Image: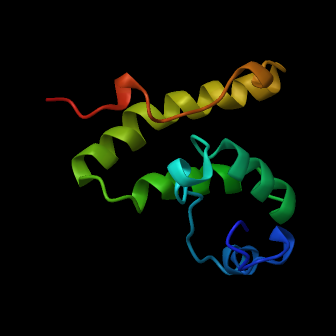
């Protein structure tokens, strides 16, 4: 939206694309330029604008791993070892009401490739 391609996120074509099964992910564009870190706010905006549910959020998050440029071995590690634990913790935080103190991030020391 910052670039002005879409004036209102509710009319962004990705909503239609997702409804037709086209895969997408929510990724940062240029956090250094725009002065933010992570994609939490992007997920918040997308969830409201596109009426996403937990299933949608999980798929978009996994797509961020699946379609990233990291090596396949590291993708597998993220999908199988890191993501399930973080996803469960995040969902639990929503259910118990502590989500305001929790931000799910995949960029932590434990997610770094093992040497």
Residue 68 quadrant: bottom left
Frontmost residue, 27 versus 57 = 27
x and y percent of residue 12 in the render? 76, 76
> What residue is drawn where x is 38% and y is 32%?
81
84 lies left or right of 17 = left
Instruction: Left or right? Give the position of 31 relative to 102.
Output: left
Horizontal and vertical percent position of residue 71: 23, 53
Q: Position of residue 77 (x, y in %)?
A: 31, 39
Left or right of 87? Residue 102 is right
Does 2 appear above or below 42? below
- Residue closer to the observer: 39 or 21: 39
Which x, y percent locates residue 15? 75, 74
Colouring of the image: rainbow
Tell me which corner region of the image, top left, top right, bottom left or bottom right, holds residue 60: bottom right
**The one of 84 and 51 positioned closer to us in this rendering:** 51
- Image point (49%, 55%), residue name: 64
Name the quadrant of the N terminus: bottom right
The number of numbered badges drawn on the structure is: 0
**Residue 49 can be seen in this image:** yes
Q: Quadrant of the C terminus?
A: top left
Q: Is residue 71 above or below residue 112?
A: below
Q: Which of 75 and 6 lies nearest the eye of the viewer?
A: 6
Q: Is residue 25 left or right of residue 70?
A: right
- At x 86%, y 55%, the residue is 48
Quick check: can you spot residue 54?
A: no
């Amino acid at each position: 939206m910052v670039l002005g391609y879409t004036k209102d996120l509710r009319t962004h074509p990705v909503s239609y694309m997702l409804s037709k099964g086209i895969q997408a992910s929510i990724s940062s564009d240029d956090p250094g330029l725009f002065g933010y870190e992570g994609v939490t706010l992007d997920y918040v905006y997308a969830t409201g604008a596109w009426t996403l549910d937990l299933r949608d959020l999980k798929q978009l998050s996994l797509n961020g791993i699946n379609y990233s440029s990291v090596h396949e071995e590291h993708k597998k590690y993220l999908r199988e070892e890191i993501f399930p634990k973080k996803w469960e913790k995040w969902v639990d935080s929503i259910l118990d009401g502590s989500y305001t103190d929790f931000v799910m991030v995949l960029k932590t020391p434990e997610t770094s490739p093992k040497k």
